[in-house]
Image (spheres, rainbow, N blue to C red):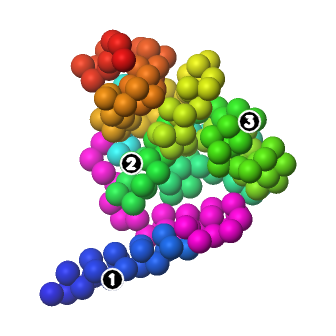
């Protein structure tokens, strides 16, 4: 009974925290609610700290970026694109984020909004959907991927039957010189 009560309490707490993320009006409120929700995540999934090549996941290091508002990235803001049970955005792809990323993916309303309220360009753990979306618009985006800091979970989680996801996976496999059987040869 005690274990079941703890699981139910944690679930309710996560729902309340996620409601905070969903109802936040500004990006700062969203990032603060995200940090609160992430602090209650307890399960790093199997292979959750493994990079694409099967090695230990490297940091998606924000230290070279002078960004006082968003000095760290990753679900837990540890500069790791780790896979965790509560990261429903799947922030597994580490990229050297370009200037127009937030606007082109539809997350910022305008360039001014991106500059004022979103992380500055530089290394950032982005959602798998955002990588696939931006890659469709900018095929050279693959060159901004930081292979050793991208989580191996992308190999399992991209759906090869969805064209944009298949192309995203294929681009990661090619960029990072992967020969895994999960890497598509065509889409």
Residue 84, image x and y in percent? 38, 54
Q: Residue at x 48, y 64 (%)?
A: 38
Identify the residue position indicated by label 1 in the image: 9
Q: Which residue is mark 3?
A: 100
Q: Which residue is under mark 2?
A: 83
Distance in Å between CA atoms under marks 2 and 3: 26 Å
Q: Position of residue 21 (x, y in %)?
A: 56, 67
- How far, Cα to Cα, is label 2 from label 1? 22 Å
* Residue occupying the point 75% across, 35% down: 99
The C terminus: image quadrant: top left
Q: Earlier in the sequence, mark 3 or mark 1?
A: 1
Callout 2: SS? loop
Residue at 32% x, 20% y: name it: 183
Secondary element at tag 1 = helix
Circle 2: is it few (<14), some (14-19), or many (20+) Cα within 10 Å? many
Q: Earlier in the sequence, mark 2 or mark 3?
A: 2
């Amino acid at each position: 009974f005690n274990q079941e009560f703890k699981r139910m309490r944690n679930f309710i707490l996560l729902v309340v925290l996620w409601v905070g993320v969903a109802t936040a009006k500004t990006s700062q409120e969203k990032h603060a609610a995200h940090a609160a929700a992430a602090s209650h995540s307890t399960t790093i999934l199997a292979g959750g700290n493994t990079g694409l090549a099967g090695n230990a996941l490297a940091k998606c290091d924000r230290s070279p970026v002078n960004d006082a508002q968003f000095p760290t990235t990753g679900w837990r803001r540890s500069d790791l694109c780790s896979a965790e049970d509560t990261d429903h955005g799947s922030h597994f792809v580490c990229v050297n984020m370009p200037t127009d990323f937030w606007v082109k993916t539809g997350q910022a309303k305008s360039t001014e909004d991106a500059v004022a309220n979103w992380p500055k360009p530089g290394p950032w753990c982005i959602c798998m959907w955002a990588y696939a979306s931006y890659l469709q618009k900018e095929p050279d985006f693959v060159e901004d991927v930081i292979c050793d800091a991208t989580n191996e979970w992308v190999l399992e989680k991209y759906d090869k039957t969805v064209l944009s996801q298949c192309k995203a996976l294929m681009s990661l496999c090619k960029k990072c010189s992967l020969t895994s059987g999960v890497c598509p040869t065509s889409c």
